[in-house]
Image: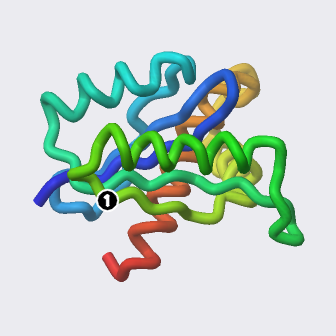
Amino acid sequence: MARIIAIDYGLKRTGLAVTDPLQIIANGLETIPTVQLFTFLKEYFAKEEVETIVLGMPTNLDTSDTDTTAPVRALKKKLEKDFPQKNVYTVDERFTSKIAIDAMVRGGMKKKDRRKKENVDRISAVIILQSYLESKGS
């Protein structure tokens, strides 16, 4: 089996998570500057077999668009164009940042580490990926 990668897209930073080859466990992969996303993905796909890309879709509580919804939709189209052999899906990410912060607190992460936005982004990507895995019955 091939891996599944999840993207928590941000205008400045993007969090990434990936499954094991059996698609059982979601692990944080990296937080990178958003401008480096496609370079990172091309390099990662060259060394790891990935069949699916899961993208966190930001919406407000009432499901209306946020300021990053349009850029995420544009990203989805670019991913589908640049990586046509990969499946690209979206997952609701409305509460991922709050869940990520709660998980860091419960996990005993030090306050200074919880303040690092890159940690929140990476853990949010894990939550997006885990949500996808649960929705498909893995």
* Image spot of residue 81 (x, y percent): 36, 44
Quadrant of the image containing the C terminus: bottom left
* Residue depicted at x 62% and y 25%: 13
* Residue depicted at x 54% and y 18%: 35
Left or right of residue 36: residue 21 = left
Residue 43 image-quadrant placement = top left
Crowd rating for badge 1 (residues with CA inside 10 Å; few <14, some 14–19, many 20+): some
Q: Nearer the viewer, residue 82 or 52?
A: 82
Residue type indicated by callout 1:
Asn
* Residue depicted at x 44% and y 48%: 6
User: Up-down: is 95 above or below 110?
Assistant: below
* Image spot of residue 17 (x, y percent): 42, 43
The residue at which mark 1 appears reads as: 87
User: Up-down: is 51 above or below 40?
Assistant: below
Q: Nearer the viewer, residue 60 or 125?
A: 60
- Disc 1 secondary structure class: strand
Residue 99 image-quadrant placement = bottom right
* Image spot of residue 72 (x, y percent): 62, 45
Quadrant of the image containing the N terminus: bottom left
* Residue depicted at x 53% and y 56%: 128
Q: Nearer the viewer, residue 63 or 126?
A: 63
